[in-house]
Amino acid sequence: MIIKTGKSFQDKVFDLLERGKENAISIDSLVSTIFGTRFIGSLLKGRQIRKAIEQMREEGTPICSLSTHKGYWLAKNWEELDEFLAEYESRAYRILHTASRMRKAFREEYHQESFQLMEING
């Protein structure tokens, strides 16, 4: 089945999502259903779908996915949403922590270089 309607792209993606982890749909299935092509060789189409999912999440749509479970689905209960949010927030924390460490290391290195330049010029 290929979806060809006047619906927005987000609506097309949303319409394929079902409630419950057991009904997860893979990115490959989303690409082939929406675009009529297989995911392999269609990375741009996969990115388009991921972007639509992220935009819907930003609007509050409870679209879940887990590193331990293939595919996307709509949360059917608090347990599914909490499991997704715990992993999502943990990923965000790790990214922020890494950025902070990089900033600190660079600042220390830059400060050291600045100090050495001041000694040479001073």
Image: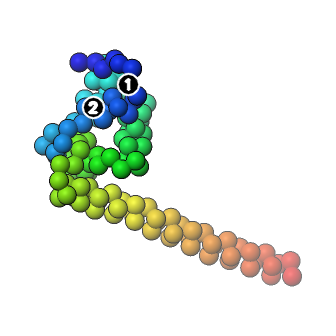
Check the image and report above or below for 27 versus 6.
below
Q: Which residue is mark 2?
A: 15
Q: Quadrant of the N terminus?
A: top left
User: Separation of disc 2 and disc 1 at Cα?
Assistant: 10 Å
Q: Position of residue 62 (x, y in %)?
A: 29, 49
In the rendered image, the vertical position of residue 16 relative to residue 3, given as above or below: below
What's under tag 1, amino acid-wise? Lys
Q: Residue at x 38, y 43 (%)?
A: 56
Badge 2 element:
helix
Q: Is residue 26 visible?
A: no
Query: In the image, which disc is placed on residue 108?
Result: none
Q: Residue at x 42, y 39 (%)?
A: 51
**Are the two marked residues, 2 and 1, in contact with CB atoms closer than 8 angstroms?**
yes
Is 86 on the left-hand or right-hand side of 94?
left
What residue lies at 16% left-to-right and 45% top-to-bottom? 20
In primary-sequence order, the first of circles 2 and 1 is 1
Left-right relation of 20 to 41: left
Residue 87 image position (x, y, % from top left) = 29, 59
Residue 25: which quarter of the image?
A: top left
Examine the image and state in which quarter residue 41 appears: top left
Write down the residue under mark 1. Answer: 7
Farthest residue toward the right? 122
Residue 29, percent from left and from top? 25, 29
Circle 2: is it few (<14), some (14-19), or many (20+) Cα within 10 Å? few
Q: Quadrant of residue 52?
A: top left
Residue 106 percent coordinates (x, y): 60, 69
Q: By what rule are the colours in the image chosen?
A: rainbow
Using a 10 Å C-alpha cutoff, classify the residue at mark 1 as few (fewer than 14 neighbours), some (14 to 19) or many (20 or more). few
Q: Amino acid at mark 2?
A: Asp
